[in-house]
Amino acid sequence: MICPKCAAEMELVTFEGITVDRCTGCKGLWFDANEQKELKRKKGSEVIDSGDAATGRRMDKITRINCPRCQKPMIRMVDVDQHHIDYEACTTCYGIFLDAGEFRDLKNDTMSEYLRKTFGGPASGTPKS
């Protein structure tokens, strides 16, 4: 598979039986449907996100990409629990692409994010305008 952001080859990385694709160039991560949710629940899984967050922020500016799995245009989403994190999602195969550092960030909820989850709020991402 080829990275939708920098066109480098993707490599397979596995954590506790869940395999995802990581770009060998920008270190972005491709998650097939529900893999990100499963990995987020596993302690220590942020180790798969080995890329530099500064590189991730630069790559985050690239917003018009096609799904590396099915080649359909992806849409920009914002995480409902952590509004500063946006990512690309495929509406056909339901995979998502996170830039380097974003998965680590998702794993580290702030206190306000924890309270929002604990006391209510939507459970999935929302489209970003």
Image: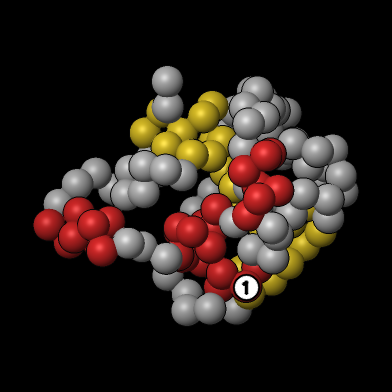
User: What element does badge 1 sit on?
Assistant: helix
Residue marked by disc 1: 47
Asked if residue 39 lies left or right of residue 109, the reply is right
Q: Position of residue 62 (x, y in %)?
A: 67, 29
Look at the image and name its color scheme. secondary structure
Along the viewing direction, whichever of 72 and 28 lies nearer the viewer: 28
User: Looking at the rendering, in which quadrant would you find the C terminus?
Assistant: top left
Q: Position of residue 29 (x, y in %)?
A: 66, 52
Q: Position of residue 124 (x, y in %)?
A: 34, 44
Rendered residue at 57%/43% (across/down): 96
Asked if residue 79 lies left or right of residue 119, the reply is right
Q: Amino acid at mark 1?
A: Val
Q: Quadrant of residue 74?
A: top right
Is residue 125 depicted above or below 39 in this figure? above
Answer few, some or many: residues within 10 Å of disc 1's Cα (few below 14, many 20 plus, some between 14 and 19): few
Rendered residue at 77%/62% (across/down): 12
User: Looking at the rendering, in which quadrant would you find the N terminus?
Assistant: top right
Rendered residue at 46%/34% (across/down): 77
Q: Quadrant of residue 17?
A: bottom right
Q: Residue furthest front?
A: 54
State the count of labels. 1
Rendered residue at 53%/63% (across/down): 104
Asked if residue 109 lies left or right of residue 65, the reply is left
Is residue 45 depicted above or below 77 in this figure? below
Asked if residue 47 lies left or right of residue 4, the reply is left
Res 127 seen here: yes
Res 93 seen here: no
